[in-house]
Image (cartoon, rainbow, N blue to C red):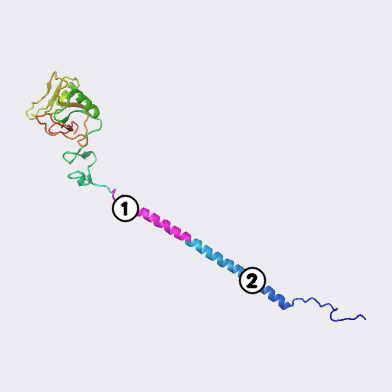
Amino acid sequence: MSDLTPSSIASPTPTPSGKSKTGMYIGLIIFIIVVFAGAGVGIYFLTKSQSGSSTGSSSSTGDKKKDTSDNKKKDTSGDKKKDKCTGSCDSEANCTCPKGTECDSTSKKCEKSLPTGQKEVYLYDEGSYTLNYDEANAAAAKYGATLAGDSDVVTAQAKGADWCRWGWINDGRTVVYPAASDSTNGCGQGTVFRDWNTPKEKKYGATFLGPKPSKSVLPECPPRDKDQTPGPPCQVAFSSKKWSQYS
């Protein structure tokens, strides 16, 4: 019989009891729950943070839109349509002339606009009798006009042209002025007055044929003085009754 000693007897490998296994499974489950719960909390706070950032951005965009809208309102408030002029139409009146009229630079009242492109005869000067024939020709070109012919002046006179002011015509040797049936400052009536064989270097006004500019572009000439006084470019009314043949 072999000698059996405590040291020679193999000890059985301990195995977990049923209670131990159950505890281990419970612990594992708790661990998993904790991990998932922590992940869920993290995701929640991350989503909330992103949502808050997006809301702030939207709010900022909304504020920008509001500011832009407010600024637009402020900017366009100054563009409000002006009232129609009923009296003076100068810059201080802060109004606009009705359609078909324009502000006369001399009278500061709304006057009938002249038809665009319609040619007529009118008298141009630069002060009082300051243009020789060549200067009169050059001035006409500046205003899209030519010097009128004698027949043009005759036609204008028949339609009521009436001014007491000599002006060169296109033949280069004659100055004329038309006088209608009513007397014009003692200058005669009912005909076209001519001064033939006038030297080209002599100074007079210029009789234009072309679209008559508005007074805002070319003001009305003051009454002519006896001296040949230079002044700013100007034009004369068609007659004492009408500014233009087409008025």
Question: What crowding class fits label 1: few (fewer than 14 Cα within 10 Å), some (14-19), or many (20 or more)?
Answer: few
Start-end of magenta stretch: 53-79
| Residue 203 belongs to the span the image colors magenta | no
Furthest-left residue in this view: 186
**Is residue 65 visible in the rendered structure shown here?**
yes
Tag of residue 31: 2
> Which residue appears at 58% of the width and 66% of the height?
39
- Sequence-wise, the earlier of marks 2 and 1 is 2
Magenta region includes residue 68: yes
Q: Position of residue 161 (x, y in %)?
A: 15, 28
Quadrant in the picture for the C terminus = top left
Q: Nearer the viewer, residue 99 or 131?
A: 131
Residue 114 image point, x, y percent = 22, 34
User: Disc count in the image?
Assistant: 2
Q: What's the mark number on residue 195?
A: none
Among the 4 quarters of the image, the one containing residue 204? top left
Q: Which residue is mark 1?
A: 74
Find residue 52 and report its horizontal and vertical position in percent: 48, 62
* CB-based contact (under 8 Å), mark 2 and mark 1: no
Task: Please tell me whether the stretch drawn in magenta is mainly helix, strand or loop.
Answer: helix
Under circle 1, the secondary element is helix
Direction from residue 192 to residue 142 in the image, left or right: right
- 3D distance between C-alphas at marks 2 and 1: 64 Å
| Residue pictured at 42% horizontal, 58% vertical | 60
**Image: 223 above or below 175:** below
Quarter location, residue 108: top left
Q: Amino acid at mark 2?
A: Phe
- Mark 2 or 1: in front is 2
Q: Amino acid at mark 1?
A: Lys
**Residue at horizontal 69%, vertical 74%?**
24
Residue at the (56%, 67%) spot, across then down = 41
